[in-house]
Amino acid sequence: MPDMPLKQVPLVRPQPSEYASYYEKYVSLIPGTDVLGVLEAQQMLMTQLLAARSEREGNFRYAPDKWTVKELVGHISDTERVFTYRACASPVPTALQWKDLSRTITLRMAGSTTGR
């Protein structure tokens, strides 16, 4: 099947009525309307930051009952997936889809890298 051309949609800031008021503190942090540009710059910055860390630094936790740096990065990645899904999903995700996501996050926190 041939690739379909992507529809170009002008980027505009979401209106306050399009998101819960709680998220205003996050939406307001994005300068201008180039959300994709901001995400690409953040990806490059995080890649550089994390690539410069050693395995030992990734396994560091400042207290026995606290998350490691790797676990924090995994949590941030999982959260980004949730927000992306929410932004792109239609209709609202089913309970089964949320259960699968919750299971994946739980397994990741338990140290599983396979998701099983």
Image (cartoon, rainbow, N blue to C red):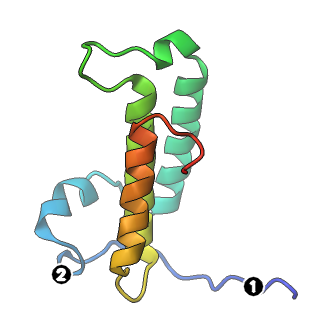
The residue at which mark 1 appears reads as: 5
| Residue 27, x across and y down, in percent | 27, 60
Pick whichever, 75 or 37, lies toward us. Answer: 75
- Residue 80 in view of the camera: no
Pick whichever, 109 or 74, lies toward us. Answer: 109
Q: Residue furthest front?
A: 116
Q: Helix, strand, or loop for circle 1? A: loop
Residue type at numbered disc 2 = Ser
What label does residue 17 carry, if any? 2
Q: Residue at x 48, y 13 (%)?
A: 57
Q: What is the C-alpha distance between the residues marked 1 and 2?
A: 31 Å
103 versus 18 height, above or below = above
Q: Is residue 1 left or right of residue 96?
A: right
Pick whichever, 57 or 42, lies toward us. Answer: 57
What label does residue 74 carry, if any? none
Residue type at numbered disc 1 = Pro
Q: Residue at x 55, y 51 (%)?
A: 116
